[in-house]
Image (cartoon, rainbow, N blue to C red):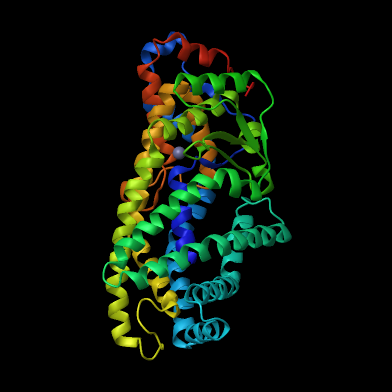
Amino acid sequence: MKQLTGLLLLFFLAIGGVSAQTAPTTAMPPQHQASTAQAAHFDVEAATNAYMAELSPAQRARSDAYFEGGYWLILWDLLVALGVAWLLLGTRLSARMRNLAERITRLRWLQTAIYVVMYIVLTTLITLPWNLYEGYFREHQYGLSNLTLGGWFGEQAKGLMVGLILGTIALVVIYAVIRKATRTWWLWGAGVALVFMIFVATIAPVYIAPLFNTYKSLPDSPLKTQILSMARANGIPATNVYWFDASRQSKRISANVSGMFGTTRISLNDNLLKRSSPDEVKAVLGHEMGHYVLNHVYKGIVFFGIIIVLAFAFVRWGFGWAERRWGERWRLRGVGDVAGLPLLAALLAIFMFFMTPVTNTITRSMEAEADAFGLNAARQPDGFAQAAVQLSEYRKMHPGPIEEFLFFDHPSGWHRIHRSMIWKAENLDDPMVRSGEAVTPAGTR
Ligand SMILES: [Zn+2]
């Protein structure tokens, strides 16, 4: 289940927004902003370096350490998932949970549901210390979280409730499919998983996100007028802009254009509003609108649909292989037996581990597209470069090319600044780009 939720999460990340940590917005030296007179001699590399220099060596070291630690977490997460699966299967606890469910009811689907509820609660408890380190203590260690320990547990409890409801429904349907189509279940199962992901992505902005944050209509302001104008100019059917209290959880700046089939909405968080200049807000929202206009949700469904089919094919092969070796010892009765769920979850975790560079590259490519769209839509290259600097506290600024390929689900800060400065250099004859500089002189941001 954790893997299924992980997959859903991955999908949200793919279609979701710039999720960002901010540096204080005071004292940003804009010497790098070329004056109109210098326009002809605009030096892209020097301008990029000037933005990079806004971060002290200590800030860079901290951000690098946080992000590079995340590479190892991918491996530890896999080992934890495998350890949990081994514990449930090797001790035959999983088989006993199935037997218990069979004693409670004769209805097959209800047996599955009862097992799944026990499985989700049990695995959540077993992995709690690890998740506490990863999600609470480590985040606080780097100053990225605003949650108290009680607040963190509250969020976990809500997440568990959502996981129990959605996970139970999804797995009851998937197991029904597995038992019905004994040979082709992996294809049908992948289809069901995909349809379910689309369903969750549709309802999430309206029914799930408000469980964790309060969404309100953004009060009227010149900025809101400009955001809605940019939306209309780009064919986005939004008549309102929402803001939400992400500062409850963290200091990260973030915005998104989320939902589908009529649930589309533009949201930005209070951190972005409080910590960033209007130019940055417009630059970030231009990026988010790019996700919408470029149909990244639907492209994401196609890309991740392929990944899910491959994942189920791998799980089908892996399950047969493992069952021949250990099936009897673990008291499993075939792939349709819900007691094998820990094995399915472990195989899915292994597959997704090795697919990390692929899924990262799919999302990173779409993010780069949204960046390019946002620069053209918002025409705020300095706003976007500054936002990239703000994102640096939790994302390494300047990785090597292989490192970026393997581990980055967004372009690196250096790439985003560099591309912004190239865009700026090519658009300096536009009075709007130049006037953008004129209204953000030193010290006023
Ligand atoms: Zn994005």
**Residue 78 sits in quarter:** bottom left
Q: Quadrant of the C terminus?
A: top right
**Residue 371 seen in the current view:** yes
- 122 or 280, which is in the foreground? 122
Indicate the position of residue 292 as horizontal and vertical percent values.
44, 33
Whether residue 229 is situated above or below residue 179 in the rendered picture = above
Indicate the position of residue 441 as horizontal and vertical percent values.
58, 17
- 51 or 75, which is in the foreground? 75
Whether residue 421 is situated above or below residue 259 in the rendered picture = above
- 373 or 103, which is in the foreground? 103
Q: How many numbered badges does the structure rendering display? A: 0
Indicate the position of residue 341 as horizontal and vertical percent values.
43, 74
**Residue 415 sits in quarter:** top left
Whether residue 147 is situated above or below residue 239 in the rendered picture = below
**Residue 276 seen in the current view:** no
Ligand 1 found in image quarter: top left
Horizontal side, residue 249 vs residue 392: left or right? right
Indicate the position of residue 352 as horizontal and vertical percent values.
37, 62
Q: Residue at x 38, y 16 (%)?
A: 427
